[in-house]
Image (cartoon, rainbow, N blue to C red):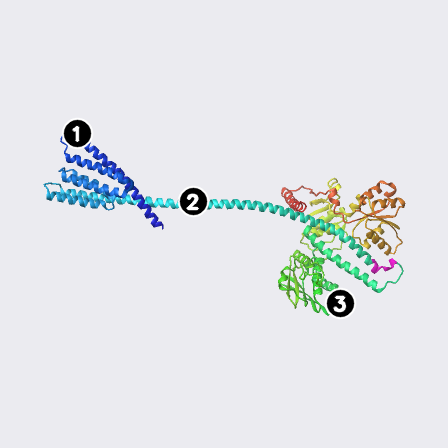
């Protein structure tokens, strides 16, 4: 197709070139005829034949012009052969020796306008010269003119060939230019289409970004709602459940509180069933709250070197009662020489208990094997049972939250599907992995792997005035100036890269700094005194970090109360707190939850001491009860409708008569205390901080603030 197009374009170019040349030569013929006629008019001896020949020349030029309009090819042939014919007539009529030389012009014109026309014209003119020399008395120089015609034919052919080659090149370049122009147009169209597609993609991206922003906002709203749900459900579910547990425990363990009468065995069994079922319900609620807490703030592990065999034996003893009375054997198979593992004892026990509970729930007959063995650099712990097994299409979802193999309400086994999900998180936090193998109708085998770590033996120090040496000497140390062991324990769980050592007396800081070479000293101070008093002074170059962590003693001291107890309360903790106050006989319980107030009364009566208990169910009734008769102790709930616990406490402090009465606050938690009073982190160093140290601190703080902002936005 390209060759045909190129040939077509070449022919068109040649035809256009010849047409234009023919038109110009027609004008030349007309002009030549007119000038010749004017020349001969000036001469007296003008022959008639010359005038006729010049008229023919003018007529030929005019004919060529007329034919050029509609028949350009015929005009070319007419011009060439007409000129040759007129030249032949002139050579026959006139005996001028210069006249044959005009044949050279005809040869050149014929070579250009007609293919190989120059050669034919040269042959015709040479033949005519020979004929004239033979038939007339003309004496034209035949051989000289013939040689001239031959040279003219050769020269014109070369010129025509060069011209045609140039036209061919021109046509090829024109074709290439046209092709490039078409390609450019195609590319421009493609570019326009691409730009249009990019505009559409950009608009789509903008809409997607807006949708992502909206989805992120919805996710943040959902997360906040989940956090609020977790906080509310902790109070709304645990408080009534604490009543069920408390009352059923008192009825089952201390029935004498309710009077001296015989309890039927059936009633005792029913009470025990209520107590047992409420414990199971509390375990399910704890699983849901633990999962919510993991997603909100994560969880922390207390790593220690633990021998695996006694941990597994104790855990297996706990679940012995689950298979009692059934033809199921519990077996323990532990490989000898297992190394100590750096694990959180409580979390790993919970994982093993979850796996054993599942195996006991789904195994009616056969055996349940708890197996521990070393595999390379890992220790594998497996729970293998001969139960119903799990379908292969459900194995991949088994560790998902709230997933259960049987989703129907007719399933024979309880639970909400969180035990395996929580177990998976605990194992992964230990840098391990957990998986399951099962054949339906044959049994299942749950296995988790923990990395091995070797530990050197530890010899505790004999100096009882100093804190004990850390279990891993290679880890850096932190000294914590704090008397509350709960806060130190919290730091030990959060700061896993350092050994946290408690210091109760600031006078020991210099000595302990020289002994342990700590990375820093953490001083826990009250928010309102932070930065106002000079920091603890030590002689060594150890930075001192003042920070604020919630201390129950501050809460009680700020409110000038005897103490506070978080709900749900424990009977032993309540009795110990009352004992620390002193001689207490009359107790006033102020709580809007009548059931909780009754539970407190039952706990106090079950202690065997002669307590006198009065109850009030809101702040107004509490003030009336206080004014009626002063008790030895007030157990005051913080959250109540109308006049709440804080308002009643302010009223007591304003009345000198009531201000001396000891008060124990009953509250859900003290987590809202610190945001109300504020908190700061202050770093002191004897020699100041280097710029790189300041930048590292700023980097760590800003990263934490980003996380904090994402959680609260």
Residue at figure coordinates x 86%, y 56% from the top left: 606
Residue that badge 1 annotates: 42
Seen in the picture, residue 266 relative to 497 is either above or below; the reply is below
As measured in the structure, the alpha-carbon distance from the residue carrying label 3 to the one carrying label 2 is 87 Å
SS for dot 2: helix
Seen in the picture, residue 354 relative to 26 is either above or below; the reply is below
SS for dot 1: helix
Q: Position of residue 701 (x, y in %)?
A: 66, 44
Q: Is residue 92 visible?
A: yes
Residue that badge 3 annotates: 324
Taking the magenta stretch, the answer to whether it contains residue 573 is no
Q: Quadrant of residue 440?
A: bottom right
**Image mark for residue 228:** none
Q: Is residue 458 visible?
A: no
Residue that badge 2 annotates: 185
Q: Position of residue 28 (x, y in %)?
A: 24, 36
Which is more N-terminal, label 2 or label 1?
1
């Amino acid at each position: 197709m390209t060759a045909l197009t190129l040939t077509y374009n070449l022919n068109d170019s040649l035809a256009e070139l010849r047409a234009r040349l023919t038109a110009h030569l027609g004008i030349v013929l007309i002009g030549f005829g007119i000038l010749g006629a004017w020349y001969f008019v000036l001469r007296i001896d003008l022959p008639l034949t010359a005038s006729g020949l010049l008229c023919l020349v003018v007529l030929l030029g005019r004919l060529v012009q007329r034919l050029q309009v509609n028949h350009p090819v015929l005009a070319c042939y007419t011009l060439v052969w007409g000129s040759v014919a007129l030249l032949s007539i002139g050579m026959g009529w006139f005996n001028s020796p210069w006249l044959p030389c005009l044949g050279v012009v005809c040869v050149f014109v014929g070579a250009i306008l007609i293919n190989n026309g120059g050669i034919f014209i040269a042959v015709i003119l040479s033949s005519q010269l020979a004929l004239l020399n033979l038939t007339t008395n003309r004496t034209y120089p035949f051989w000289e003119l013939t040689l001239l015609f031959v040279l003219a034919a050769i020269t014109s052919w070369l010129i025509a060939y060069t011209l045609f080659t140039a036209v061919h090149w021109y046509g090829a370049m024109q074709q290439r230019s046209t092709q490039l122009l078409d390609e450019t147009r195609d590319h421009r169209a493609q570019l326009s289409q691409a730009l249009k597609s990019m505009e559409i993609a950009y608009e789509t991206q903008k809409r997607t970004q807006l949708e992502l922003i909206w989805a992120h906002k919805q996710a943040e709203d959902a997360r906040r709602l989940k956090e609020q749900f977790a906080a509310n459900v902790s109070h709304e579910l645990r408080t009534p459940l604490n009543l069920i547990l408390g009352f059923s425990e008192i009825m089952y363990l201390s029935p004498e509180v309710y009077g001296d009468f015989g309890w039927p065995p059936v009633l005792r069994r029913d009470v025990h069933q209520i107590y047992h079922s409420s414990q199971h319900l509390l375990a399910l609620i704890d699983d849901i709250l633990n999962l919510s807490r993991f997603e909100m703030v994560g969880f922390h592990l207390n790593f220690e070197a633990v021998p695996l065999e006694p941990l597994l034996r104790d855990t297996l003893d706990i679940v012995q009662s689950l298979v009692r009375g059934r033809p199921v054997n519990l077996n323990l198979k532990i490989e000898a020489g297992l190394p100590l593992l750096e694990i959180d004892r409580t979390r790993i026990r919970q994982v093993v208990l979850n796996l054993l509970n599942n195996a006991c729930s789904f195994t009616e007959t056969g055996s349940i094997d708890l197996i521990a063995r070393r595999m390379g650099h890992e220790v594998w712990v497996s729970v293998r049972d001969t139960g119903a097994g799990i379908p292969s299409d459900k194995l991949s979802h088994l560790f998902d939250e709230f997933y259960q193999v049987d989703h129907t309400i007719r399933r024979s086994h309880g639970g909400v599907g969180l035990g395996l999900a929580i177990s998976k998180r605990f194992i992964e936090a230990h840098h391990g992995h957990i998986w399951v193998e099962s054949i339906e109708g044959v049994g299942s085998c749950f296995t988790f792997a923990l990395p091995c770590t070797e530990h050197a033996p530890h010899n505790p120090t004999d100096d009882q005035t100093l804190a004990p040496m850390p279990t891993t000497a290679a880890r850096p140390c932190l000294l914590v100036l704090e008397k509350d062991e709960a806060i130190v324990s919290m730091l030990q769980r959060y700061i896993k890269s350092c050994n946290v050592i408690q210091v109760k007396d600031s006078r020991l800081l210099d000595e302990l700094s020289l002994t342990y070479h700590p990375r820093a000293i953490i001083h826990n101070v009250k928010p309102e005194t932070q930065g106002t008093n000079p920091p603890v002074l030590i002689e060594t170059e150890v930075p001192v970090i003042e920070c604020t962590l919630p201390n129950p003693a501050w809460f009680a001291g700020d409110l000038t109360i005897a103490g506070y107890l978080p709900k749900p309360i424990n009977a032993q903790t309540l009795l110990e707190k009352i004992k620390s106050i002193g001689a207490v006989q009359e107790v006033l319980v102020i709580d809007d939850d009548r059931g909780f107030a009754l539970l407190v009364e039952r706990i106090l009566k079950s202690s065997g001491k002669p307590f006198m208990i009065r109850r009030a169910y809101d702040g107004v009734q509490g003030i009336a009860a206080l004014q009626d008769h002063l008790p030895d102790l007030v157990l005051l709930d913080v959250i109540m409708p109308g006049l709440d616990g804080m308002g009643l406490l302010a009223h007591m402090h304003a009345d000198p008569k009531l201000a001396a009465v000891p008060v124990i606050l009953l509250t859900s938690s003290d987590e809202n205390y610190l945001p109300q009073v504020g908190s700061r982190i202050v770093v002191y160093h004897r020699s100041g901080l280097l710029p790189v140290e300041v930048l590292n601190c700023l980097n760590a703080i800003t990263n934490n603030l980003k996380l904090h902002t994402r959680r609260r936005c």
